[in-house]
Amino acid sequence: VNNFSHISLIVKKYYSIGACFGPLYCNLKAKASTMFASRTVLLSLGQNAQCLSLRNRIAEVLQRAMAPKRPLASLANSQFLLKRPATPNCSPIRCYAKGKDKKKEKGKTKVTVNENQLAEVINVGSLRSLMEKALLQMEDDFVKHLSLRSTTGAIESVPVNLDGNEHTMQELAQIVRKNPKTIVMNFATFPQAIPAALKALSKSGMNLNPQQDGTTLFIPVPKVTKEHREQLAKNAKQLFVKCKDSVRDVQLKFIKQLKKQDRISEDLARSVEQQIIAIADQFIANAEATLNKKQAELLGEK
């Protein structure tokens, strides 16, 4: 290489080898521009005895720069290397946390009820009859105890526990509507039933506040307020829970009877048990649908 431009390119290319190239390059360029009109730097330096030392340094640097690359460990002590800390050869990888708190929704396996198979093991008619009874009782309680306005019909059907026996209110008193805002109950025939009647009315859930005058009870018809509607809706939920518990009790009763039978196989017993649970679930679903409809009616929702 005899041309100054070639030397400049080489020196610039390998400038990162050592900090000494900075002053060396400036010194070389200054001497070449001031001492010689041509750009043959090495020849000019060779003709000038004072630049012999500089020429040797340039030749040594070029020889080092153009030599094959050596391992990093062998160049660690070189004065031309920049001392930089070694970094591991790795690429950043972002790891995402697993959603441990997200529970996978598992659909329940649909159970097909085989009436013939059930009939061989349990009394299917009795099973359905007892569960149906719990549902009908809830519907009957809805009619009796969850009326928005206190009517004579609703009060007449209120049950009263007297001397250990249950009676309806109309069996113990004469009930008439005196005016749109007042209902009158006359207990002249059974005055001893008044304390039990007062207790039954307070538990009826109709928000009644009867006033006693001798053997007569005067019941003001309460106004339909938002609070009254919400309370009736809560009472409906309590009656539904009672119905649900009754259905589950019937379910448990028949499952216990099933497990006492030794003449059937385990697979058949397991299948029948699942079918009993499926029947109970269907009755509870029907009861819940009735509850939702009643609550919407009580709260004035469409």
Image (cartoon, rainbow, N blue to C red):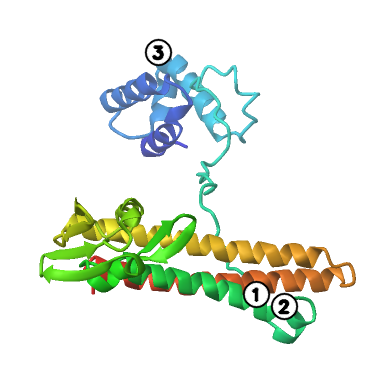
Q: Residues within 10 Å of mark 1 (few under 14, many from 20)?
A: some
Q: Residues within 10 Å of mark 3 (few under 14, many from 20)?
A: few
Residue 203 visible to the viewer:
no
Q: Residue furthest right?
A: 263
Residue at 50 percent of width and 25 percent of height: 61
Q: Residue furthest bottom?
A: 116
Q: Earlier in the sequence, mark 3 or mark 2?
A: 3
Q: Secondary structure at mark 2?
A: loop
On the image, which quarter does residue 217 sit in? Answer: bottom left
The residue to which callout 3 is attached is 50
The residue to which callout 2 is attached is 123
Q: Label 3 is placed on what type of residue?
A: Gln
Residue at 79 percent of width and 77 percent of height: 121
Q: Earlier in the sequence, mark 3 or mark 1?
A: 3
Is 120 situated above or below 45?
below
Q: Label 1 is placed on what type of residue?
A: Leu
Is 101 situated above or below 131?
above
Is 170 situated above or below 222?
below
Residue at 34 percent of width and 72 percent of height: 143
Q: Secondary structure at mark 1?
A: helix
Residue 127 is tagged as 1
Label 3–label 1 contact, CB within 8 A? no
Label 2–label 1 contact, CB within 8 A? yes
Question: Of tags 3 and 1, which is closer to the observer?
Answer: 1
- The answer to whether residue 296 is left or right of residue 89 is left
Residue 87 is tagged as none
Q: Residues within 10 Å of mark 2 (few under 14, many from 20)?
A: few
In front here: 113 or 119?
119
Residue 278 visible to the viewer:
yes
Residue at 57 percent of width and 19 percent of height: 78
